[in-house]
Image: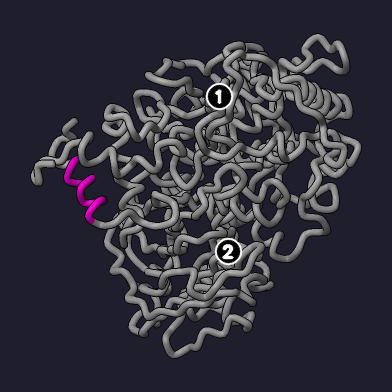
Amino acid sequence: MTMDRPSFEQDIRPIFAPYVACMKNVVLTDDDGAAEMDLASYDCVVRFHQPIRVALTGYRPGSTAPHPMPPGGALPDDKIDLFLMWVETGMAR
Amino acid sequence: MNPEIFRIRHRCAGPVSVLFTAFLAASLLLTVLTVGAEASVRMRKNIDDLTPQELAAYEHAIDVMRQKSLANKNDRAGYLWQAWVHNCNGVPVPDSGAAVPIAADPAKNGWFSDADAFCPRMKAPPAGFHTEHPGMCEHAKDLFLPWHRAEFFYYEQALRAADPEGRTGPSTRGVTVPYWNFTQTPTGVRFPKAFENRESPLFYPGRTEGPLTEEDRQRTSPYLLAYLIRDLKWPQFGGYQVGGPGNYGAFEAMIHNYMHDTYIGGVLDTPTTAGLDPIFFSYHAFIDYILEEWIDSHAASEITSPNQYLRGQQSPAFQSPPGFVPGTGVQTMGQVKNYLDIKALGYGFDGGGRPQFLSEADLTRLTTAYDAENKQGFGQAPQSFFTYLLSEGGARGYHSGATPAVVQSVPVVLPSGAPDSLAAVELVRKPLHQGYSYQADVYLHPASVPADLKDDAFRSRYLATSVNYWELSGPGHDHGDMTETRLTAAVQQPVASIQAGALRKEAWMMTVGITPAGPAARPDDFDQPRLTAIPAQ
Ligand SMILES: [Cu+2]
């Protein structure tokens, strides 16, 4: 990756890989409609980056996420920060 | 601020009552004038008010829906699919579309076996199958109440479609879900009589049995319910938007969750099985009535996330709600805004000629009495306002929480009470292999008063709030590990009362007692509780 602009394919997709099969069972909704939560899909992760952000940062103090993700404990901080940076820098493919 | 004129209620009762009465008169008149035009509005009745014929039609509808599921577990008009709309995220369905028949479990009063009915593990479907998404329910957020209303809009269509011509029993054409008003004395031992008839399809084995405990009575206090409905604005009442300042609404945390895991129990213990027992639908039909009562006391326009879609895949044979516009991607039940006008949705609630809720005036009477008896405010009055609500204004004290498994005490600084902010407690349970439902009793007390939770007088005086967490992990939700859980509960009323009273200069402690339902909790399962301030909206 380029340190200042992470990309989905190189940086984000590998983080989510272990959770793809499980999360595909779940449908998420927004103001446009609904979709299977496909963590391997760029479009899907872009579309639901807000609830994903809330869930991934849910273990941090001050979060209000009722059920932080992933189950079993927080991702390592550097991975969460990478995701946040990916969002902040415009969610490059 | 003068503690003498401290008042509990946020609302100004006088003018509101006058306005409200005028509004009520006007709407009564309107009802009389338009009653002919509203012939298509179906009324949901109290289950104890059903005629024998109406009850028979409801039981027949459920029985026929059950038969449909036995013939094909994936029939969307069947009872099992309708239960899955609540319970399950994904189920494997054969690519061929072939029916998957299942057998009734003789040990379950004609209902399905757990193996057939519980949600499958959340993984990729086997070869020859694809995943379909019946639901599932929304909890711990503002979608909680609207989502369940949408679920019922379709469930009632499934009931009516069961046997409209009355081929194998009474016609189901006019069937609605009868509600169970759990704030009134049950007509059976614990539930409405109809649910305790073991011959009826309304009976599902495994529920909590025996007469109501004092705790059951306190948690179903009509005063507590009336207070939540009449005095709490939307996010505090109905839940916060995802990523917003809170999560659970007070109704969900204080009443709904307790009813599931303790009062009713059985498959209602967890969201992934709750819909399997038909008592779930009558229980939640009353919750839908509560939502309507809240809308009548406030305004539907305050409900957040009006445009958000509600997940749930239903039979294409069923009608969509008025105003439905399909969204992108997978099928849904429509948007929150499609579910805010029940008349347009074709139903209403029949109170049976008697009040099903305590009125604004009843509540004012209670809170005025409390104010008069307890001018000293929180910490000095022998019963906190919350205890008073639970014990319906009686002097019975707080009957719960004497033997918690986990007790945590922390010194707290009372939030400053900035406008538009609420004092709230944050409860965090660490990730566990086996999650559990629990009750959290939150006490605020001067540091000079030791927390003695065995002492009824201590609990009654210092109880700031009490909330329940309803465990989400269950069949099909097993990730191997359970996630951390967070519950944010407002304690604005007691904190404001302290700040208006003589004890405001004291050093304060917060003690939280955790009483788990089921397996034992370990003392280190929870983080230290925090008292914080959250934005009100
Ligand atoms: Cu429920």
Residue sitting at 50 percent across and 32 percent down?
A: B124
Query: Which residue is located at x 51 percent, y 34 percent?
Result: B147
Which secondary structure lies at badge 2? strand
A61 w.r.t. B226: above or below: below
The chain containing the residue under callout 1 comes to B
Using residue A76 as the reference point, say whether residue B481 is left or right of it: right
Q: CA distance from mark 2 to mark 1?
A: 43 Å
Q: Residue at x 66, y 63 (%)?
A: B518
Colour scheme of the rendered structure: one colour
> What range is drawn magenta here?
A78-86
User: Mark 1 sits on what residue?
Assistant: B127
Q: Is residue A81 magenta?
A: yes
Residue A3 at what x, y percent from top left?
Answer: 10, 46
Q: Which residue is pictured at 61% across the width and 20% down the height? A: B94
User: Image quadrant for the N terminus of chain B?
Assistant: bottom left
Kindly give the residue lying farthest to the bottom in the view shown: B448
- Are labels 2 and 1 on one chain? yes
Which residue occupies the foreground of this view, B500 or B439? B439
Residue A11 appears at what percent x and percent y? Answer: 21, 41
Q: Residue type at mark 2? A: Gln
Nearer-the-camera pick, A75 or A60: A75
Residue B61 on image: x %, y %: 78, 23
Q: Which residue is mark 2?
A: B439
Residue B267: within the magenta?
A: no
